[in-house]
Structure formats: structure tokens, C-alpha cells
Image (tube, grey):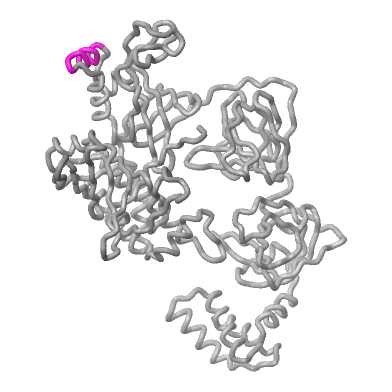
Amino acid sequence: MKQIAESIKDRFFKLGVDVPLEDIENRLSELITKFKVPENEAQRSVVNYFLKKYSIPKNEYYARQAEARLCKLSDLSEAGQWTDVKVKVIQLWDKTHESIAQVGLIGDETGVIKFTKWLNAGLPELEQGKSYLLKGVLISEYNGRLSIELKSNSSIEKLEEEVEVGGGEFTSEEMESELRDIEELTQANQWVSIRGKIVQLWENTHESIEQVGLIGDETGVIRFTNWTSSELPAMEEGKCYLLSNVIVKEWNGRYSIQLNKASSIEILEEDIEVGTATSSYFGAMVDIQTGSGLIKRCPECKRALIKGACAEHGKIKGEYDLRIKAVLDNGTSTQEALINRELTQKSVGLSLDEAIAMAAEALDPGVVLDRLKQKLIGRYYNVSGPRVERYILVDSFVESSEMDKNLLETMIAELEVE
Amino acid sequence: MPGYFREVARRLFAQELRDSDLTSRDESDQYAPQYLLTPTGARVNRVFLVGTLIEKEDIGTDSEYWRGRVSDPTGSFLVYAGQYQPEAAQFLAECELPAFVAVVGKASTYTTDEGNVLTSIRAESIQAVDAKTRDLWVLETAKQTLDRIKEIEYVTPESPASNPYTKLAKEHYAADMKAYRALLLKALESLKENID
């Protein structure tokens, strides 16, 4: 605390004001000790108080501070400080919020750091691959990682000489993404390259999306999103492509890849055979849809009959079958699952013959559906099997019975700390 | 699946539903679903809950209209089922009390003359389940509520919320997340006693 007080005193002294050290210390100590304010917040508050008291404009105080030091990225350590850096723009990312003008990575010979240029800073555009002197930028910290913010009192000067980039956490080699199998994509925020065939293109749900769909290779299928801002060419269904520098995203335990400005697309002449992906899902069964329970199928094509008729073969004497079209829900997504006769019989304890007898007695096949709902809805299940369109064709269906005690203990421990 | 998607059944405790009063719907479309925004930022249309059915009553005048009270570790949900929810109404008519039940339904709100907003669940389905399923639900609901709490706590002017509803919930309710954390702790500790 003493150090902070002295540094504040020094700074004011340079601006021609002699603030008594005791005054600074008292104010700091009240905020930090009595009111539990974090040190950097307290420091800012105390500085602002004296600036106001002596009518010193804020930018004069901070400008001088910024002028004082040109830092290497590896020397940045303290959030809340203002500094100057000489850097090269390595990568520009898609901005995640409307208040951000630009966001991405910058680097110098000592390291690489994320930067955010706020829209209200009103600063000129940075170009990828160009080098700049950024003056009066703020070092900030989020989740233990430092980043740099460009604000309204920052400035940008373009440099003729190129800043070398090396070292640090992200080396340029690591940026070159490796070619991976789709099956291996299980780490979020990883940059990779994949080769695959466009299995399906879906209808766009948003204007910021250029294309969305499924791409597959021999090991599996994954969802991809090509953002409009990537300015990449459109891909065609059934064609094969090499996608370089795409980023892996995770949502709800499911992985997808995204193409952005840093990515590239190359068409391949070869044909890739797409393997079936096995999916699994955990959730509560929240609905069993119509067309479940005791149904009749067309003996020719095995399609379910609707009012005794097959869509292909017309009015026909069908064969009985049991199946479930279930909806599972985990609180953040839903999943439809088709459960065949064998698994239906096993999970409900009802054979096809018993189901037929039940329906005959009640003169209503609906009683079979009611029985399924009673037994299954509201309980938690693990299902897995190949995924076809929006369904999982279930080949394993297990009711979840074990409470995750680890999760319980971890959460209690976490909540008790607060 | 253009044009159709199924509303996800959100998980939340009774106390949080009770504290909620902000509804929204797309006014330009009369078939647009209504959403209830909760203090931790869940945007709720459909709900899945598991608890103990402790009271039931037929409050209908002409036709049957059932109201059930389902309790969880933090309070209770009021669950309604009438002629348009025949399966759920039939369940309430026939079941015995108390019972562990799983309810799938839509969150609905009613504003009193004094301007208070009362929340309840219009049941699509009610089924009897076991104690184990109820415990799984409590753990899952605590986990998902805590995830929402953490998200809302991270929101500051410097790092704005990526989810607009998180931001809206924070602005509208300005709720004390510590109180919700305490609620979760209480719920989880009750689970632990069941296990030991």
C-alpha cells in the first residue's frame, strides 16, 4: 500500500502538486482495509479524488504515465496500468459484441497478447500483418490472463519497420493448425485443419452465417459454420474440401467447427467416404411422440402405416411392431431418439404379444402408449447409437441411476467458499 | 428443420420461478411463444421439474381443473392441468399423496390487480417417478443454476455479456446472487443427507 501511495505522490509531484503522503495513505487504507476494495480500484479512486481536488484533467495524468514507458509484452504484469507497446497484428478475430471495434492477437519479439479496441475509442483500423506503436493502452486482466485495451485516450501510429514476433505462449508454429481427423476434435478453441465431404447444407438461420451444415470424413461427421465475415467462397453439398485454420467450438458437450477470416478453403479432387458417427446423449425423457407404441408397418417397405395405409404401397394389411420416438432434454438442448422393438420390450417389460393383447382388450392401441409414457417419461437416460438427421437410432438405452457424488461434493465445496 | 424447433425444458428451482416476473413475446406474431426471464438469466418457456406432490385440488367449476403443489428443496411450484391437458389432469385426479412426480410444462404468469406477478406451471405431462430421479433432478438443477449465476456474475461494463438475456436479467432484477448461491447450497446439502 505504501508503494502505491508513493507512486501516486510521485506522479502528482511531476504535475506540480505536492499531495501529503499521509492523505493518500489514509484514503487508500480506508478503501482497501475497511471497505475491502481491490487495490487497483482503490488506487484509481484515490487518484481520481486528488485529480478532482486539484482540477487536473484526467488525460494529463494518464498521458504522462503512458509517455513514460514503452514496454515489451513479456514485461506486462500488472492490470490497471497504462503503457505503450510496439507490436505486429497477428490475427483479427470476429468481434463478439457491438461495443467492440476490433479484437484479435498482437505480438512482439517477447510474446503474444489479446487486444480489444473499443468502438467508442474512435481509433483507426488495424490491419492484420502490419506493425504499430500503440500508445496509452490499458493492461487489463480477465480470468488470470492479461490483455490490452485500446480506449479513447490511446493512439495508434503505423510503423514502417516490421516488429518481429516470437516466443510467448502462442508461437507462430502453433498457429499453423494441424490436419486432424474429425473424431479427434474434442478440444474447444483449438485451431485445426480438416479434410472432408460436405454431407449436408442447412437452411441459414441468421444473416451473419454464410453457410452451415455437416462435414464428414472417414471417422465421423461434425457441424460447421462459415461466418459471412470470413469472406470465404461457398461450398457445395457432396464435394470434398480441405479446410485450414478452422477453430473447434464446444456447446453442450457437442463439438463444431467454425470458419472465420483466418481460415481457408481448398477444393479436393478425391472422394472421401464418410463414416457414421456414433452419438450419445444424456437427458430426461420429456415426451414420447405420436407414432410410438404399438404400430403397424408395411410388409413391403417396413414403413409405419398411417391410418392403415403405406405412403408407398397404399392400403395394406400391416405387421405389428413396437417402437418409441422419444424426446430427451438436458436443460440446454433436446434430442430425438428412435428406440426399436427389442429395447422397448426390455425397458418397459412388455412383449409385442402382450402389447397386442392389451390393445385388443381395451379396443385402443393408445393404452400401450400410455404404459410407455408412465414407465419412461420424467426419468433420466443415457442413449447412444448412430445419428441420422435429427434422430439417434438408439442401440444402447440405459436409465441413469447413479448420482454423481463427485459433482455434488465439488459444488458444495465451491458454494461453501463464498 | 426449418420453421420448427422444440422448446428446451429449462431447469430451475421453485424459489427462482417465484422470484420471476419479466415476460416477453414477439408481438408481431400471435403464435409466438411466451418466455419468462428469471433472475439468473434463464429464458424459460418449457420447464422440467421433479419434486414431491404434496397437495392437489379440483378448483374447476364446470369441468375439472386441477391444481397441484409440488415441492422442491427451495419452495413449491403450482401446477395446473385442465381439459386441454387431459393426461396430466387424469394423473392428478387419480394419484395418491404424497408422491414423487416429474412434470413437463409451460411456465405461465398471472398479474394480480395489485400488479404482483404470480408464476405457475401449465402441465403437459405429470408422471410418478422415484426418489432417485428426484435427487438427480436436484443435482442437475443446482448445476445449471450455478452455471447461470456464474455467467451473470462475470458481467461488468468492461466485459459485457455475450448473451443478451443475461444482461437483461441483471438489469431488470439486480438480484443478489449470493442469496441464490445460499439457496443452492441448502438444496445440495439436503441431497447429501439423503445419500449418507
Q: Residue shown at 12%/39% (left/top)?
A: B96
- Residue B91: give x, y in percent of width and height: 19, 35
Q: Residue shown at 42%/55% (left/top)?
A: B41
Give, as a single range, the part of the protein colored magenta.
A353-362
Whether residue A357 appears in magenta in the rendering, the answer is yes
Whether residue A95 appears in magenta in the rendering, the answer is no
The secondary structure making up most of the magenta span is helix
Total labels drawn? 0
- Residue A142: give x, y in percent of width and height: 56, 61
- Residue A332: give x, y in percent of width and height: 43, 43
Q: Residue shown at 26%/49% (left/top)?
A: B192
Decide if residue A220 is on the left or right side of residue B103.
Answer: right
Quadrant of the image containing the C terminus of chain A: bottom left
Query: Along the line of sight, which residue is nearer the eye, A107 or A62?
Result: A62
Query: Along the line of sight, which residue is nearer the eye, A40 or A306?
Result: A306
Specify whether residue A174 is in view. no
Specify whether residue B163 is in view. yes
Most distant residue in the left direction: B96
Dividing the picture into quadrants, the one containing residue A351 is top left
